[in-house]
Image (cartoon, rainbow, N blue to C red):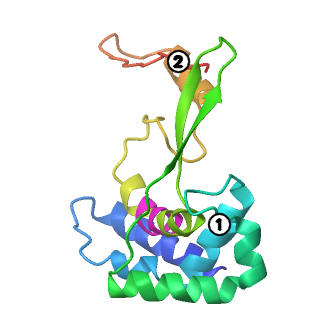
Amino acid sequence: MDPSRHLQRQLSQAAKRSRNRRCHALYDRIFRPDMLWRAWREVRANGGRAGVDGVRRDDIAQQGIAAFLQAREQALRAGSSRAQPVRRVSIPKPDGRHRPLGLPTVRDRVGQQAGTIGIAPRCEANFQDTSYGFRPKRRAPQAVKVIKAPRVSHGDVVEVDIERCFD
């Protein structure tokens, strides 16, 4: 098993055993080389355009991924890493409006993804099983099925935010 996935599983199991347990030392997980490599693979697979620095994923690959990740590790470890401004673009919508979107640099995306990989298992353990918003492997159609399922009691409350659900 990939070491980063093994760590995620351990963090998740520990969080589920003790939901009130505080994690005071998750930051050191973010700059582990295996976490940064996995973050790089996920950022690369996700695609996207360059941020304000103009550096693309292909540029990093040409200059050397290992050197790039080593520099990220050193900056994160030293606490000297600061996010750059995001590049603002507008995405046209079918109704003629535009949706603003901020594009972080690839460097920042790798750091953010490493943070997500390291922290998500701890957060996931605290969510209710019925929570579907912005969670991995959970989609709106699954939530709708749960809402439509027959209820044993008549005291259930369902909160749904469907504004722009189908954008």
Sequence-wise first label, 2 or 1: 1
Could you say where residue 38 lies in the image, as x and y percent from the top left? 63, 73
Q: Amino acid at mark 1?
A: Val
With 10 as the anchor, is 97 left or right in this view?
A: right
Please identify the quarter of the rendering in which residue 16 is found: bottom left
Q: How many marks can you see?
A: 2
Eyeballing the image, is 132 above or below 154?
below
Eyeballing the image, is 109 above or below 77?
above
Label 1 residue SS: loop
**In the foreground, 47 or 118:** 47
Please identify the quarter of the rendering in which residue 63 is found: bottom right
**Quadrant that contains the N terminus:** bottom right
Disc 2 vs disc 1: which is toward the camera?
1
Query: Is residue 32 in sight in this rendering?
Result: no
Q: Residue at x 64, y 71 (%)?
A: 40
User: What segment carries the magenta color?
Assistant: 113-120
Q: Residue at x 58, y 56 (%)?
A: 51
Mark 1, residue position: 55
Q: Residues within 10 Å of mark 1 (few under 14, many from 20)?
A: some
Could you say where residue 96 lies in the image, as x and y percent from the top left? 65, 13
Mark 2, residue position: 164
Eyeballing the image, is 132 above or below 9?
above
Q: Residues within 10 Å of mark 2 (few under 14, many from 20)?
A: few
Q: Amino acid at mark 2?
A: Arg
Please identify the quarter of the rendering in which residue 110 is found: bottom right
Q: Is residue 115 magenta?
A: yes
Label 2 residue SS: loop
The answer for how far apart the CA atoms under marks 2 and 1 are is: 33 Å
